[in-house]
Image: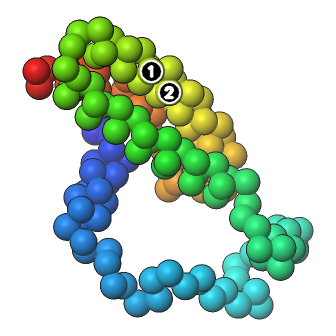
Amino acid sequence: MFNWGRIVEEQIRDAQKKGEFDDLAGQGKPLDFDDELTALEGDLKMAHHILKNADALPFWVELDKEIRARQQYCRDLLTQIGAAPSPAIRRKLVADYRSEAKSVNDHILHFNCICPAPHTLAKAPINIEANIVEATSNE
């Protein structure tokens, strides 16, 4: 079974590295939503209106931002594992990676349960052991 989420994430990272998202129209500016034109109705529309006026984001959006930052930290740890100068340092980094990745996977599970469109926004968990094998095989 393909892990489409991982494939898409890799394509996005590659595009970012190539600078394909640099200098986009409206970059660095908030999106301009017209509350009257949104598809939201009732209580959900009111909740989003209150959040917007309070300059706040829905919890699932904040959680998504945290997950992305922690996923990057995990990728950085994998890079450090591959470049570790000694087995002792590598073991320490692997233990740190396992702990952080497990925590990220717990957050991903929570995110997938609360995001409003799980069929399109759901995140794939980190394949911890496969990533460790891949990082350590580059020795």
**In this picture, residue 24 sits left or right of residue 42:** left
- In the rendered image, residue 67, in percent from the top left (x then y), is placed at 54, 45
The residue singled out by tag 2 in the image is: 100
Establish if 32 lies above or below 110: below
Residue type at numbered disc 2: Glu
> Quick check: can you spot residue 48?
no
Q: Residues within 10 Å of mark 1 (few under 14, many from 20)?
A: few
Please tell me whether mark 1 sits on a helix, a strand or a loop: helix
The residue singled out by tag 1 in the image is: 96
Between 68 and 60, the one nearer to me in the picture: 68
Tell me if label 1 and label 2 are in contact, CB under 8 Å. Answer: yes
Give the CA distance from mark 1 to mark 2.
6 Å
- In the rendered image, residue 139, in percent from the top left (x then y), is placed at 10, 21
Q: Residue at x 35, y 32 (%)?
A: 77
Q: Quadrant of residue 136?
A: top left
Residue type at numbered disc 1: Asp
> Quick check: can you spot residue 57?
yes
